[in-house]
Image (spheres, grey):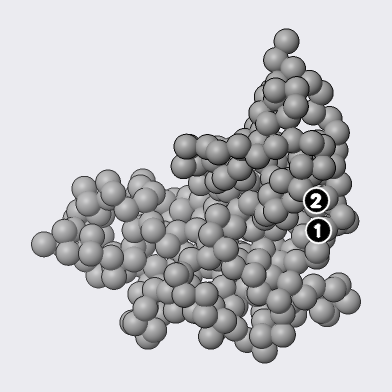
Amino acid sequence: MQNTKTVQLTHIQEENIKDILLKLKWREEKSNNEYVKLRMKSYLGSAAMLYTSGKLVLQGNEDFSEILGETSEVGNKTLVPHLGVDEVGKGDYFGPLVVVSCFVNPENVDIFEKIGVGDSKKFSDKKIMEMYEQLKDYEYYYVSIVMPAEYSDLQKETGNVAILLARQHSKVIEMGLGDLKSKNIECNTVVIDQFSNSKSRILNELGKMGQGADINQFHKGESDIAVAAASVLARGVFLEQMEKMGNAYKFDFPKGATHVIGKGKEFVKKYGISELKNVAKISFKTTKDITK
């Protein structure tokens, strides 16, 4: 009977899985699938595929407990206390930009693993809010909420969305490192889901404490447990703020940026153009279509 095991690997576990399998006499094979980063086969004919999403799939007629055990051990041994940073809302026309940093260390990592945190874009809003309810009382996460009117002002000031994002990332990094230091908790590492092609973008905006930390940036950063936690928390805060905004205006604000023109026109008709800046990122080109 074929056995199939699927596990989401952290960035560190991804880097180690090939060595783990080679040690167990697995051999590497070519793959034509663009989403497969690594394909390996055992001498018993089992297959292992590591996808670009960080998901590892093991299939075959053997027991994979040794592989899974060693992979888990690698994660536990090499987990360095660190802050993970991610943002939500930068592509949404309505609502705020939310940036969160979240601290994870070997002592508290179980909190996030048990809940099953991952890239917030992969979960439904309902699932996100269920996870957020379990995490929102966690002591070591730090939030910056940039409401639409402030977002527009900051974009005018910076002239560049990437700089705006970098400054908000720097803000929550400084908040986190400062709080942890005040509580005598060691944290010298920060992992960021890279949002700009220029890695120097965030480095140029870091505050004094951030400049003294080891900053790691990579795409698909949600494979890191702290970034994944920050992603879920940021989405939870964003949805919470959207609900508050909807209640305040008695209006159903759509998420995203594709099907918003009709709702935007409806809002302007009800509240006027001048009020749009308080609920929407009016720097988006969408605004011209709404107000013409």
Residue appearing at x 51%, y 46% in the figure? 121
Percent position of residue 144, x then y: 57, 70
Q: Residues within 10 Å of mark 1 (few under 14, many from 20)?
A: some
Callout 2 environment at 10 Å: few (<14), some (14 to 19), or many (20+)?
some
Can see residue 152? yes
**Which residue is painted at 60% across and 78% down in the image?**
171
Where is 166 relative to 98, above or below? below
- Relative to residue 43, is residue 151 depicted above or below? below
> Image check: 292 left or right of 138?
left
Q: Farthest top residue? A: 1
Report how far apart the C-alphas of labels 2 and 1 lie in the structure: 6 Å
The amino acid on which the numbered mark 2 sits, given as a three-letter code, is Gly
Of residues 62 and 102, the one drawn nearer to the viewer in this rendering: 62
Do the residues under discs 2 and 1 have CB atoms within 8 angstroms? yes
Give the residue number, with chain letter if any, for mark 1.
79
Give SS at disc 1: loop
Circle 2: element type? helix
Query: Observer-nearest residue: 98 or 240?
Result: 98
Which residue is at 87% across, 55% downward?
77
Residue 170: quarter of image: bottom right
Looking at the image, which is closer to me, 143 or 87?
87
Quarter occupied by the C terminus: bottom left
Most extreme residue toward the left is: 292
Q: Which residue is mark 2?
A: 75
The amino acid type found where label 1 is placed reads: Leu
Quadrant containing the N terminus in the rendered view: top right
Q: Is residue 112 visible?
A: no
Residue 113 position, x and y percent, is: 76, 44
Q: Which of the labelled discs sits on residue 260, or is there none?
A: none
State the residue at coordinates (35%, 75%). Answer: 152
Q: Position of residue 175 (x, y in %)?
A: 68, 76
Instruction: Tell me where residue 268 appears, x and y as whole percent.
Output: 22, 58
